[in-house]
Image (cartoon, helix red, strand yellow):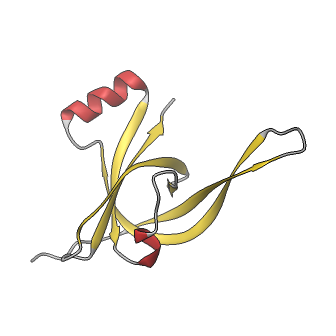
Amino acid sequence: MKPIFLGERVSLQRYTATVDEYNQEIKAWSDLGDERAKVFQGRGDERRQAAREQGEKTATFMMHSNNRTRGLLIRDRIVHKGANWDITDLSDDTPQRGFLEATARRVVP
């Protein structure tokens, strides 16, 4: 089997919310740590077309399956090349290969 090169650095962040003195929700992100990933952006013609129409981009991030990546939640996010990607799906269905895939989207201007 050909080895998979996980060459891009990504940061994983956990969403947290607190309430200020005016009872307004304050969103905050805390760093979970960095991982190496293989990034598949805009897989498939349908996904690319939807991104153009809706102003969002979709990507799949393949990372090693470890305690940190297996602990990711849908409300968490991935920071890649300065852009924030909201996780929309997590797939740990390849444990025999040792990888986890996170599908994420970001709003594009």
Q: Is residue 62 above or below residue 21?
A: below
**Which residue sits at x=88%, y=38%?**
22
Q: Is 21 located above or below residue 9 in the figure?
A: above
> Which residue lies most toward the left here?
1
Instruction: Report x, y in % for residue 30.
Output: 65, 62
* Residue drawn where x is 48% and y is 33% of the image: 108
The percent position of residue 50, horizontal first and vertical second, equals: 31, 27
Q: Quadrant of the N terminus?
A: bottom left
Frontmost residue, 90 versus 10: 90
The number of callouts visible is 0
Asked which quadrant contains residue 53, the reply is top left
Q: Which residue lies most toward the front here?
A: 23
Of the pair 59 and 13, the residue shown nearer to us:
13
Q: Is residue 54 left or right of residue 2?
A: right
Give the residue furthest to the top: 53
Q: Is residue 28 above or below residue 100?
A: above
Residue under the image location 46 percent in, 63 percent down: 72
The image position of residue 55, as x and y in percent, is: 43, 27
Q: Nearer the viewer, residue 37 or 69?
A: 69
60 with respect to 32 (left or right): left
| Up-down relation of residue 44 to residue 64 (above or below) | above
Q: Is residue 56 left or right of residue 82?
A: left
- Residue positioned 40% across, 70% down in the render: 70
Q: Along the line of sight, which residue is nearer the eye, 30 or 20?
A: 20
